[in-house]
Image: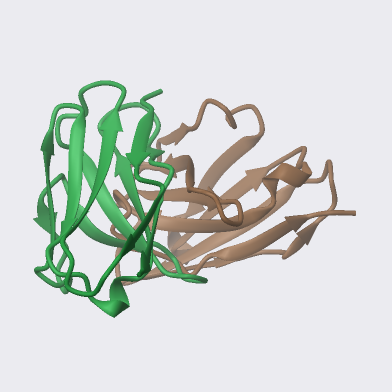
Amino acid sequence: DIQMTQSPSFLSATVGDRVTINCKASQNINKYLNWYQQKLGEAPKRLIYNTNSLQTGIPSRFSGSGSGTDYTLTISSLQPEDVATYFCLQHNSGPWTFGGGTKLELK
Amino acid sequence: QVQLKESGPGLVQPSETLSLTCTVSGFSLTSYSVSWVRQPSGKGPEWMGRMWYDGDTAYNSALKSRLSISRDTSKNQVFLKMNSLQTDDTGTYYCTRETGRDWGQGVMVTVSS
């Protein structure tokens, strides 16, 4: 199975900051990488699919990039409503596998 | 409007079988796949398995010996059955369409005597 290593596991930032979260796959996943936001008590919400496609209705401050084994989610200007846990998911081959999550808080 | 909704018992005894139902609307099970994903409290999600649009299934190898996924297209429902439950099977269980595009609200399952 493909392992997904997500970093950092915890992030504290200020409103307006540029925030980046990374996921590294144990092998090439051919850009089949999604990013999710999960708020407390809610289901995950897909933000980005296939590395860099923005889900309809998601603010443009969210963006994704990467290739091969390395992928990044960027929030260009952090807003208070972005406080949440973020997960990556690879769906290239074999069982889907998720990153361990990044808990994002306001400083 | 696409919707998915999980239903099932909130409490299961150790060693017993979990049965969950995902009822969908706004799309056809013969056109889209549905997966089951579970999440222990405070931890990351784990993909369990998938019902493909053509009726084929795929399972997480770690759960395959205990897990069965089936469907009733006439009722727009996908079913999960997992046997020999243990306390570490406690968590929230979700169904999701395609590659995690749409999700149900989840159902909390506690395994305890």
Residue at image coords 54%, 50%:
B43
Residue A36 visible at all: yes
Residue at image coords 61%, 37%:
B67
| Image quarter hosting the N terminus of chain A | top left
> Depth check: B57 or B96 in front?
B96
Chain appearing in green on the rendered image: A
State left or right for residue A41 relative to residue B99.
right
State left or right for residue B14 relative to residue B71.
right
Chain appearing in brown on the rendered image: B
Residue B42 spot, x, y in % from top left: 57, 55
| Image quarter hosting the C terminus of chain A | bottom left
Residue B31 visible at all: no
- Give the vertical position of A17 relative to B84 (above or below): below
- Give the vertical position of B70 relative to A91 (above or below): below
Residue at image coords 35%, 45%:
A8
Residue B45 spot, x, y in % from top left: 48, 48
- Give the vertical position of B33 relative to A75 (above or below): above
State left or right for residue A15 relative to residue B50.
left
